[in-house]
Image: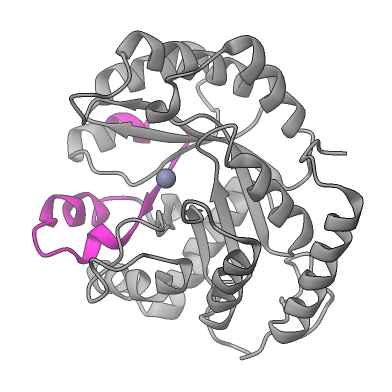
Amino acid sequence: MCGTGFASAERSARLKACAALRRNFPIPLGAGGTGAKPAIPHSPLYFDTHTHLPDDCTDEQAETIIGEAAVAQVPYLLLAGTSLRDCPQNLALAATHAGIYTSVGIHPLEVQDYDASIAIPQLRAWLACPHVVAIGEIGLDNHYEDSPPPALQEQAFIDQLRLAAETGTPVVIHSREAFPRCHELVGKYLPKDHPLQIHSFADGPAELEQWLKLNTIFSYNGMVTFKKAENIRETLRLVPLDRLVLETDAPYLAPVPFRGQPNASRHIPVIARRIAEERQLPLEELARLATANARRFFRV
Ligand SMILES: [Zn+2]
């Protein structure tokens, strides 16, 4: 039992909804599915390695988001945790849907009420669930004037890094305007070869070089399509192809031409097209590489 807190009647309703969804959107072999063939053979299949459900997302809305992603050839999603409040819904979806995985963790902007004696045992218990494949997103964020105090952010980050080291779990890093300290803490609390995903990477070539010395992958999202984001595209062109994965960070950061609208995993192909152009690769090749990198990283 993963401790998601769902009563068994509710759980069986979820499983039924899931079975209905799978009938409509068969998941290909290798994704833990039923063995049904993909809807469109030979099309690239994408992995959105970092997405969130919208606030107050109902189960029906979640099914729609997952179903629309599958239709858009995005059958693999990593629902990234940000707090003890959003993890249970992610866990329930991951437990009942082939191809859906989750990470658990407390985001640096969600640490206001952080209490290690509650948070760490809860995260440790969730790590026992087979569909929990990473700890995250965790890190440091200095972007906002009213960000939680740095000392509190650091305490939560360090505790979760220690949990990751203890359990050998891959880590999803959120580092915003915080590279030096974030990199320093990772170096101090994790073994050098510990798997790290640098999510929404937005620092420069010098920071890229530092992260590349560790066992890192880099995820790029809709920002690669933004007119003013040449700095993002600069590092995108430098990342080794075996370290590159795709993400939406939905519901934020919708790619052009959907800017200003709520983002969702169905937009991954738009992001992939731009990345393939920047890397001068056929789209199918980029999709194959990015999906293989993601599955290797999350061990799924
Ligand atoms: Zn995120």
Q: Residue at x 23, y 72 (%)?
A: 256
Asked if the magenta segment contains residue 249, the reply would be: no
The image shows residue 159 at horizontal and vertical percentages of 55, 14
Quarter of the rendering containing residue 271: bottom left
Image colouring:
one colour
Quarter of the rendering containing residue 77: bottom right
Looking at the image, residue 125 sits to the left or right of residue 118; the answer is: right
Q: Residue at x 10, y 65 (%)?
A: 227
Q: Residue furthest bottom?
A: 40
Say above or below: 241 vs 140: below
- Quadrant showing the N terminus: top right
Looking at the image, residue 275 sits to the left or right of residue 177; the answer is: right
Q: Quadrant of ligand 1?
A: top left
Say above or below: 60 vs 148: below
Say above or below: 96 vs 71: above
Say above or below: 41 vs 277: below
Q: Residue furthest left?
A: 228
The image shows residue 155 at horizontal and vertical percentages of 45, 11
Q: Which residues are magenta?
A: 210-239
Quarter of the rendering containing residue 108: top left
Q: Residue at x 64, y 49 (%)?
A: 90
Asked if the magenta segment contains residue 211, the reply would be: yes
Closer to the camera, 41 or 11? 11
Looking at the image, residue 146 sits to the left or right of residue 101; the answer is: left
Closer to the camera, 124 or 38? 124
